[in-house]
Image (cartoon, grey):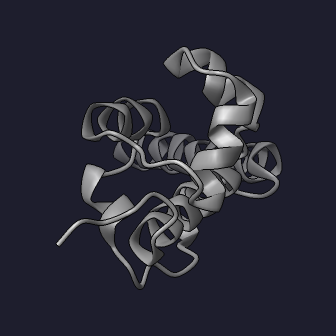
Amino acid sequence: MRIKAGSEIDKKIGANLKRIRKLKGISQLKLAEEINVTYQQIQKYEKGYNKISSSRIFAIANYLKVPFEDFFDLELKKRELYAKPKNINIRIRAAKSCLKQQIRIIDSLKTQKRWWEK
């Protein structure tokens, strides 16, 4: 059986590429530069107009840091693990603040312990 470019499989793989790329916050232009193609070629891949070679999918998967197989998952849904965490800097500051507070409490308890041991 011969599969033509633009088949349903190509469209699904292209849709997965687009979904993963967007969830990672990467533009078509940036991805194209990284894998040495034009952004128009990325558009054609994502729309399923052109087939993506396995070596090209492997390069894209490496760049996007996702499993190669995800492009072939024909039921791929929006995955939170691909999305960039929202307000990551706020979360980091809150964690640091909490950690500093815990350290102060530990230091205070150590001081109290030394005082009672005298």
- Where is 57 relative to 63, above or below? below
The x and y percentages for residue 95 are: 66, 51
Residue 111 horizontal side relative to residue 95, left or right: left
44 and 102: which one is in front?
A: 44
The x, y position of residue 83, in whole percent, is 63, 59
| Nearer the observer, 78 or 54 | 54
Q: Position of residue 54 (x, y in %)?
A: 26, 41
Residue at the spot 48% in from the left edge and 42% down from the top edge:
115
| Residue that appears at 27% across and 31% down | 55
Question: Is 10 left or right of 95, judged from the image as shown?
Answer: left
Q: Quadrant of residue 52?
A: top left
In the picture, measured across the screen, residue 88 lies left or right of residue 71, that is right
How many marks do you count on the picture?
0
* Nearer to me, 12 or 93: 12
Q: Position of residue 101 (x, y in %)?
A: 68, 49
**Residue sitting at x 45%, y 63%:** 10
Figure check: 112 above or below 30: below
Relative to 5, say whether 54 is above or below.
above
Q: Is residue 4 left or right of residue 106?
A: left
Query: In the image, what residue occupies the spot 17% across and 73% down?
Result: 1
Residue that extends furthest to the left in the rendered view of this protein? 1
Q: Quadrant of residue 46?
A: bottom right
- Quarter of the C terminus within the rendering: top left
Above or below 36: residue 26: below
Observer able to see residue 96: no
Instruction: Work out whether residue 79 can be spotted.
Output: yes
